[in-house]
Amino acid sequence: MKVLLINGSPRREGNTSVALREAAMQLEKNGIETELFWIGTKPVRGCIACGKCRENGNNRCVFNDDVTNQVIEKMESCDAIILGAPVYYGQPAAQAQAMQQRMLYAGNKSFVGKPAAAVCVCRRGGASAAFQTLQMPFQMCNMPIVTSQYWNIAYGREEGQSAQDTEGMQTMRTLANNMAVMLKMYATGSADKLPAEEWTPMHFIR
């Protein structure tokens, strides 16, 4: 079993990284393999609704000039995902959000049914709104949301300060413990996965 933890911050060793590493260490203690992936500082495209990913049917975004397809490929061999991002103006960092939208739409087959969680880090406020923003796409993709003792939020301004947020770090460890339990339950096959109903979309404009 393996969990992909994505650092959606432009700062490779910043507070988002601290929070994700705390979760990763706890997952490893539970016997779960982890991979930390930093999306870097290069531009990440937003989705332009071209629909080419569906036309091509290759589980990839047609634009291959940023990290999005790398993440989709990594998720093909991972069993769960944790996406972390800093909070900018009450929202997740734009590059993390743009990547999330494209990876889930273009690479949907690699994500459906896999446990997921979001992590947000901020100096002071806006974290709960940003956290909710990152969580909602996972729910739309039929991904079981892994809970913790609180919202997955840590606080800190200067690089590394979030390590001093003792409750925040405990929240990361609890999240990791819960994810490990869920993955192990899935692995034992103790519950059969129920067949999904055929999607029946409805629009209110006739």
Image: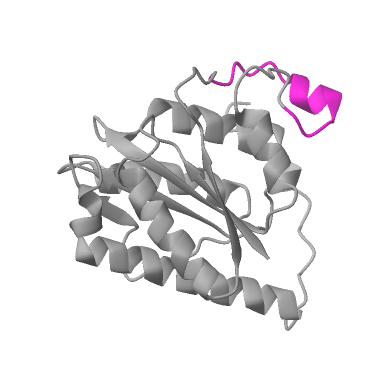
In the displayed structure, would residue 111 be above or below residue 158? below
- Residue 19's spot in the image, x, y percent? 35, 54
Task: List the single residue furthest toward the bottom.
Answer: 190
Q: Quadrant of residue 49?
A: top right
- Residue 194's spot in the image, x, y percent? 76, 69
- Residue 203's spot in the image, x, y percent? 61, 33
Residue at x 49%, y 64% (from the top left corner):
146
Residue 56 lies in the magenta stretch:
yes
Magenta stretch, main secondary structure class: loop
Residue 5 lies in the magenta stretch:
no
In the displayed structure, would residue 199 be above or below residue 42? below
State which region is magenta: 46-60
In the displayed structure, would residue 69 be above or below residue 121? above
Left or right of 201, for residue 174: left
Q: Quadrant of residue 134?
A: top left
Left or right of 28, for residue 71: right
Residue at x 54%, y 36% (from the top left corner):
100
The answer to whether any part of residue 200 appears in the image is no
Q: Quadrant of the N terminus?
A: bottom right
The answer to whether any part of residue 91 appears in the image is yes
- Residue 68's spot in the image, x, y percent? 62, 30
Q: Quadrant of the C terminus?
A: top right
Residue at x 75%, y 45% (from the top left corner):
109
Q: How is the image coloured?
A: one colour
In the displayed structure, would residue 123 be above or below residue 193? above
For the image, the number of numbered tags is 0
Q: In the image shown, does 61 or 166 lie closer to the viewer?
A: 166
Q: In the image shown, does 183 or 16 lie closer to the viewer?
A: 16
Residue at x 78%, y 27% (from the top left corner):
54
